[in-house]
């Protein structure tokens, strides 16, 4: 993951999973202290899925396995936000046997107010990412395929509005997002903190990567197939795929072009397609 | 050699709609040699093969790993610290490997070796998975 902690005007923070050479969750505001680990990408070409770490970008990710108790990291940087825009990547388990299921009452993502009441809750249940938002009615469902990476982009505001909450999910190699807009009613709630992980009683193993939260500007998606992380897709990215497959050393960018959790020859083909499509990757 | 050829013909005739990676292992001058061959159905443009050698990395000679590839294709071989050979074969213009039995190259190992294909992937010109299987014979 990119090692950054965004601070400054109108930017609340981006929480890191790694610093310098080591993968770490030390920069999160809080964790449950047990069961959430920083995942080193390890040997990306290792075929055995049971021991693989999954990451979307660079070297590290966050790994957590469902258990009787909740396992999560927490970002307190929103503090008292009245607007909140965030992005993270979610990998919902290796195949159907180990797919994540939090149940409808559980969560993989939770945004709360200062009193601990849920403002935004994302659950993974029955193969859907289920969104529940305070001051709105109903639950939205977005289908999620196991063994694939998805970006989840969230746009929330305290003020009432026809688009008071917007969630955008894109992954599994798709070039188009699924967007759902939720109308919200008036509220005085402020967004205080965010949890990423698995609620108590969840099953499966989830990976999280590249969490970035801001107050006014949306982080946006990372550039899929930008293997070397230079925000351009060209032959050097193709070479980067070869290098990662050959050496096992994780590339600094986003080599999992197919977004299937493995770096292999299909990512090389995907980068070729990206080169031909010439996507705009600049921020 | 006749036996190997007969084996190829038999496998090729039974694998019309798949790509089979074949390792044929024998004794070399100073150790063990395995020939890497592909029974191609003409659909694959890219291959990835991971071959565990059962040996340490320093004992494996990769010089001829992809030396016999068709001119239409390029490739790379490397070996990780576990003694696992990682091979890539590709054509970035979407040209498929020809149909038939294709010799990719060979691996030489000083001393004894136990070759196992731990992963074999084949992609077609649209980057879709193509059915691939692997076999090791002596």
Image (cartoon, rainbow, N blue to C red):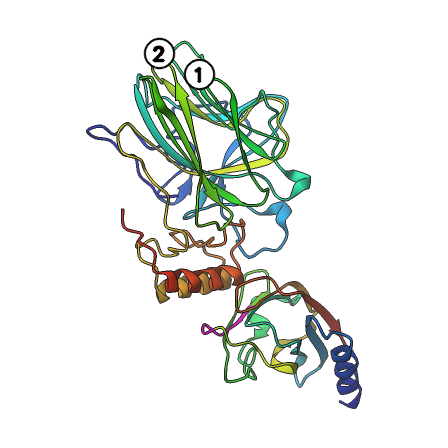
Q: CA distance from mark 1 to mark 2?
A: 9 Å
- At label 2, counting other C-alpha atoms closer than 10 Å, the crowd grade (few under 14, some 14-19, many 20 or more) is few
Q: Is residue A111 magenta?
A: no
Total labels drawn: 2
Whether pointer 1 and pointer 2 mark residues with C-beta atoms closer than 8 Å, the reply is yes
Per the image, the residue denoted by label 1 is A134
- At label 1, counting other C-alpha atoms closer than 10 Å, the crowd grade (few under 14, some 14-19, many 20 or more) is some
Say which residue appears at 36% left-offset and 67% top-offset: A235
Mark 2, secondary structure of its residue: loop
The numbered mark, 1 or 2, whose residue comes first in the sequence reads: 1
Per the image, the residue denoted by label 2 is A187
- Toward the bottom, the furthest residue is B2
- In the rendered structure, which segment of residues is drawn in magenta? B87-93
Discs 1 and 2 share one subunit = yes
Q: In this orientation, which residue lies closer to the viewer: A133 or B31?
A: A133
Q: Chain of mark 1?
A: A
* Quarter where residue A210 is shown: top left
Q: Chain of mark 2?
A: A
Q: In this orientation, which residue lies closer to the viewer: B31 or A64?
A: A64
Q: In this orientation, which residue lies closer to the viewer: B51 or A131?
A: A131
Q: Image check: A214 left or right of B37? A: left
* Quarter where residue B26 is shown: bottom right
Q: Position of residue A54 (x, y in %)?
A: 52, 45
The N terminus of chain A lies in quadrant: top left
Say which residue appears at 38% left-offset and 61% top-offset: A277
């Amino acid at each position: 993951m990119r090692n950054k902690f965004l601070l400054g005007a109108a930017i609340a923070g981006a929480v890191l999973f790694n610093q310098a050479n080591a993968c770490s969750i030390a920069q999160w505001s809080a964790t449950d202290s047990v069961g959430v680990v920083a995942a080193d990408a390890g040997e990306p070409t290792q075929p055995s899925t049971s021991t693989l770490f999954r990451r979307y970008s660079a070297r590290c990710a966050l790994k957590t396995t469902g258990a009787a108790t909740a396992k999560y990291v927490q970002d307190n940087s929103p503090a008292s936000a009245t607007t909140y825009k965030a992005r993270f990547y979610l990998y919902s388990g290796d195949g159907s046997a180990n797919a994540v299921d939090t149940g409808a009452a559980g969560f993989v993502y939770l945004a709360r107010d200062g009193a601990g009441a849920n403002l935004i809750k994302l659950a993974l249940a029955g193969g859907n990412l289920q969104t529940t938002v305070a001051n709105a009615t109903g639950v939205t469902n977005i289908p999620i395929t196991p063994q694939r990476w998805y970006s989840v982009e969230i746009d929330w505001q305290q003020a009432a509005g026809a688009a008071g909450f917007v969630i955008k999910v894109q992954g599994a190699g798709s070039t188009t997002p699924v967007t759902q807009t939720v109308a919200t009613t008036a509220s005085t709630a402020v967004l205080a903190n965010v949890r990423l992980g698995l609620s108590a009683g969840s099953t499966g193993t989830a990976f999280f990567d590249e969490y970035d939260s801001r107050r006014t500007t949306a982080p946006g998606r990372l550039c899929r197939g930008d293997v070397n992380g230079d925000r351009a897709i060209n032959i050097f990215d193709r070479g980067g795929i070869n290098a990662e497959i050959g050496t096992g050393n994780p590339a600094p960018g986003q080599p999992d072009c197919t977004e299937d959790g493995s770096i292999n020859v299909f990512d090389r083909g995907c980068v070729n397609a990206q080169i031909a499509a010439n996507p705009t990757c600049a921020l | 050699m006749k036996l190997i050829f007969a084996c190829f013909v038999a496998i090729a005739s039974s694998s019309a709609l798949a790509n089979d990676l074949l390792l044929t292992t024998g004794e070399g001058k100073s150790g063990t040699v395995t020939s890497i061959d592909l029974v191609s159905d003409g659909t694959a443009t890219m291959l990835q093969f991971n071959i565990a050698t059962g040996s340490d990395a320093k004992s494996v000679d990769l010089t001829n790993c992809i030396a016999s590839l068709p001119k239409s294709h390029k490739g790379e071989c490397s070996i990780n610290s576990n003694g696992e050979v990682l091979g890539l074969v590709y054509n970035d213009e979407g040209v498929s490997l020809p149909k038939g039995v294709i010799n990719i190259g060979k691996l030489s190992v000083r001393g004894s070796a136990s070759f196992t294909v731990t992963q074999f992937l084949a992609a077609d010109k649209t980057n879709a998975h193509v059915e691939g299987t692997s076999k090791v014979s002596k």
